Amino acid sequence: MTGSTLIILNPAAHSERAQRKRAHVESLARDCVVCATTRTGEAELIARRGVKEGFEKIVAAGGDGTINEVVNGLAGTTATLGLLPIGTMNVFATELGLPVHDLELCWDIIRADGTRAVDLPKANQKFFVQLAGVGLDAQVVKETSSQLKRNFGPLSYLISAAQIAARQPPRLFIQSDDASIEEGSFVLVGNGRLYGGPFPFFKHAVIDDGLLDVIVFKRLGYLEIIKYLQDVVFSSDIRVPEIEYFQTSRLRVESDQSVPVEVDGELVGNCPVEFSLHERPLRVLVPE
């Protein structure tokens, strides 16, 4: 097992807690090859090289951003993804039912070889595993500086959202055979049920059903969107007329403005963006 496993470790966080987790990962994986990243985007390159070198399991030790990079290196290959969740949110690991607060158990899951094939969506040419956003949340990611994140952690995104809330949202044009709406102010695309932590936004999502779950906030202001986000979180289903929820295998979002797009919390450019599913699913190590 160990000889065929590559660990890609993101040591970017500098807190004492993060340092303890890194040390824990290194002790668990002492018989495996461990590569630590030194810059953004490097995990994807290491994963791609690991596939070429014949590693059967490639483990992302980090948060959702690290997982996203590793997945973009694995997409379309036969390598299997393992997770050691040491990030702030760990949304994808939570979606898969991993014990995110117990690295020992996560390591046991990697060693046990239980796998699940999950859908692999992409936004233009960038793959993602959990979620994507066009508009508000991508704008928040874009405007949240590294310094703000270091000072305030997850709260930094709320600070940025408050600063953006008074602005006029963009006009987005929705193209999908499965949508009954043609315009909106904010679009969320889910592969799984969770968004932003343990919040089940995408009520009908199944991570291996071959469908994307889409939430479109209609022509609303940002303050109204923020209000309805709370309704989405705490309702068992989405029934308000200001929000459209549908499932599809393909979606295109355009705008006549410069509107940012994020996948798994990482910026990937601006509209227009086309969402689709890769023909080959992603194999992930999960609890049996």
Image (cartoon, helix red, strand yellow):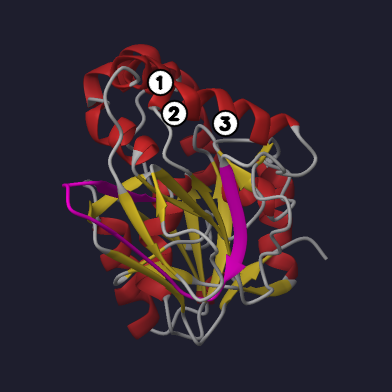
Residue 153: image x %, image y %? 41, 19
Report how far apart the C-alphas of labels 1 and 3 lie in the structure.
31 Å
Q: Are marks 3 and 2 in contact (CB under 8 Å)?
A: no
**Residue type (three-letter) at the residue carrying disc 1:** Ser
Residue 17: image x %, image y %? 50, 22
Q: Which residue occupies the foreground of this view, 284 or 38?
A: 284
**Residue type (three-letter) at the residue carrying disc 2:** Gln
Residue 68: image x %, image y %? 41, 57
Q: Which mark is residue 19?
A: 2
Give the dominant element type of the magenta stretch: helix, strand or loop: strand
Range of residues picked out in magenta: 243-263
- Which quarter of the rendered picture does the N terminus lie within? bottom right
Q: Mark 3 points at which residue?
A: 229
Residue 142 visible to an observer of this rendering: yes
Which of pointers 3 and 2 lies earlier in the amino acid sequence? Answer: 2
Q: In this view, does 277 lie above or below 25?
A: below
Helix, strand or loop at mark 3: helix
Single out the mark in the foreground, 2 or 1.
Answer: 1
Q: Residues within 10 Å of mark 2 (few under 14, many from 20)?
A: some
**Which residue corresponds to the image point at 31% horizontal and 64% vertical from the top-left?**
44
Helix, strand or loop at mark 2: helix
**Which residue corresponds to the image point at 57% horizontal and 39% vertical from the top-left?**
242
Report how far apart the C-alphas of labels 3 and 2 lie in the structure.
34 Å
Q: Do the residues labelled 2 and 1 touch (CB within 8 Å)?
A: yes
Query: How many discs appear?
Result: 3
Q: Is residue 251 magenta?
A: yes
Q: Is residue 218 above or below residue 132?
A: above
**Which residue corresponds to the image point at 69% horizontal and 59% vertical from the top-left?**
205
Single out the mark in the foreground, 3 or 2.
Answer: 3
Q: How crowded is mark 1: few (under 14 residues within 10 Å), some or many (20 or more)?
A: few
- Position of 102 with respect to 220 (left or right) is right
